[in-house]
Image: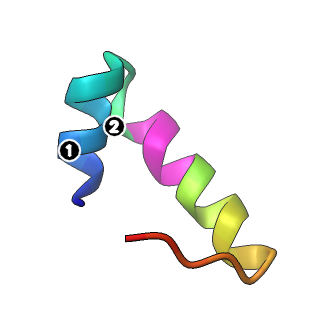
Amino acid sequence: MRAEDVAEVLEVPVETVLAAAAKAEEKGVHET
């Protein structure tokens, strides 16, 4: 799932989704 899709579904800015994804990646969590 692309960040743009997630942002649209959750109705949040793409920046928020990307920031959350970056944090998850730091923890070693990979969710697509």
The residue indicated by pointer 1 is 4
Measured in 3D between alpha carbons, the distance from the residue under mark 1 to the one under mark 2, in whole angstroms, is 6 Å
Query: Which residue occupies the foreground of this view, 3 or 30?
Result: 30
Check if mark 1's residue and mark 2's residue have beta carbons within 8 Å: yes
Find residue 15 and report its image quarter: top left
Picture coordinates of residue 23 (x, y %)?
71, 61
Please tell me whether mark 2 sits on a helix, a strand or a loop: helix
* In-image side of 23 versus 21 (left or right): right
Numbered circle sitting on residue 26:
none
Span colored in magenta: 15-19
From the viewer's side, name the closer residue of 24 and 19: 24
Name which residue type carries label 2. Val
**What x and y, as percent, mark residue 1?**
24, 60
Apparent side of residue 18 relative to residue 9 in the rendered image (left or right)? right
Q: Amino acid at mark 1?
A: Glu
- Quarter of the rendering containing residue 22: bottom right
Circle 2 sits on which residue?
A: 14
